[in-house]
Amino acid sequence: MALVTRVRWLVWVLAAAGLACGDTLVDGTYSGAARFTVNGAVNGTSQYVDEDHPQVRVGVFWSVKKPGGGDDVLVEQPATSVLAEYYRRFELKLFDEPGPEHLNTTPSGARYAIGWLAAYQDANENGRKDEDEPLIGGSSGRLLMRVPQALSARESPTGLPVPEGWHIVSTPLNCSAPSTDPVPTGDCGVPLGATCKTNSDCGGGVCVHDFIGPWPTGACLIPEPPPNGCRQKGSVLLRGPNDPTKAYWLKGCAVTADCGRAAPYQCDMQLRACRPSTDFQVDMNDRGPPRGYCKPPGTQPPMLP
C-alpha cells in the first residue's frame, strides 16, 4: 500500500514540475468547452472523392434568407469544420456562437440560425471552403437550429414554439404550412416510444426497428391508418419522405426528457415527437445541401382513410 502511495505522489510531483516549467495539460488547439457537439457520418459517392482522396472536410453552413426572396445563401461558420472519411463516424464540436451574418431575423425582431452540414474537398488544406472548392455533399433529413432566445409559434420556422438552445430538427420545416393530418383523440393503450422486440410488446401498436433510418432496440408506434381505427391522444404523425403513404404515430413530447430514451432518441423540435434523430448523415451528391428548408406549399399528402 505504501508503494502505491509513493508512486502516486511521484506522478503528482512530476506533473507539477512540468506545469512549473510552463507546460500545460492541453495543447495549443484547445478551445475550451464545446457549446454543442454534432455526430454524423459521410455516405454516398462523389466524382471528387476516390481511394487516393478518401477524406472530405465537413463544416456548418448557415442558411441565410435573401431580403428579396429566392434561394437561401449558405454561409460557412469559420473554425467549425472537421476532416471526415467515407463511411466512418465523425464528431464536430461547436465552440462559438453563430455570428450576425449567420442569423435570420423575423419582422418582430426575433432571431434564429438554421444550419446544414456540408462537405467539400479542402484542396489547399486551409480549413475552410474557398470559392474554387465546390460543395459536394450535404446533410439530409436533419438540420441544426440555434435559438438565442425562445421563439413563439408565430416567430418560429417550425410553426411551433422553440425554447432557447441548440436543437437538431427534421426537415423540411413546416414554416407556415398548415397541417391536414387527422387529430388523434383515442385512448389506445399503446406504450408509444417504449423499447420493444416484437409487436406483442406494443399492445395495439407495432414494434418498429427501421423507419427513415434505424430505431435502436426498437420502438412501439401506431401505423397510419391504424388497424383498429385508434389514434392515440397526444401522438404525432411522421410520414416517410419518399413514400408519404407509409406513416406512424409517435410519442409526443415537449423536451427530450419526455422520451425516456437514451441517445440517439430525442424530442424533435420540428415534430414535437420522440425519434432517433440526433445523428447527421452527410450524403455525397456533388451539389451540397438544399438552398431552403421550408416545406413547399401544397406538398402535404392527402389524409388517409
Image (cartoon, rainbow, N blue to C red):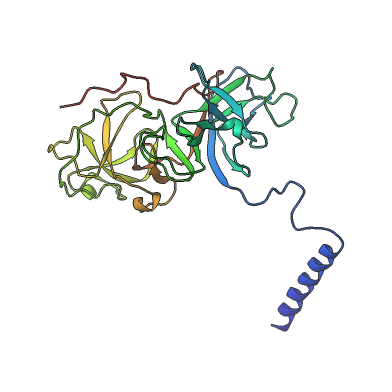
In-front residue for pair 26/220: 26
Q: List x then y, in percent, for residue 205.
A: 21, 43
Q: Residue furthest bottom?
A: 2
Q: Residue furthest left?
A: 228
Residue 59: tell me if it is visible.
no
Q: Residue at x 67, y 51 (%)?
A: 32
Q: Residue furthest right?
A: 21
Q: Residue at x 63, y 42 (%)?
A: 96
Q: Is residue 93 above or below residue 128?
A: below
The reply, left or right, for residue 205 in relation to residue 27 is left
Q: List x then y, in percent, for residue 188.
A: 16, 46
Q: Is residue 193 above or below residue 137?
A: below
In-front residue for pair 150/132: 150
In-front residue for pair 28/86: 28
Q: Is residue 44 above or below residue 261?
A: above
Q: Residue at x 81, y 63 (%)?
A: 19
Q: List x then y, in percent, for residue 215.
A: 37, 41
User: Dividing the image into 4 quarters, which one contains the N terminus?
Assistant: bottom right
Residue 186: tell me if it is visible.
yes
User: Dividing the image into 4 quarters, which one contains the C terminus?
Assistant: top left
Q: Is residue 134 above or below residue 262?
A: above
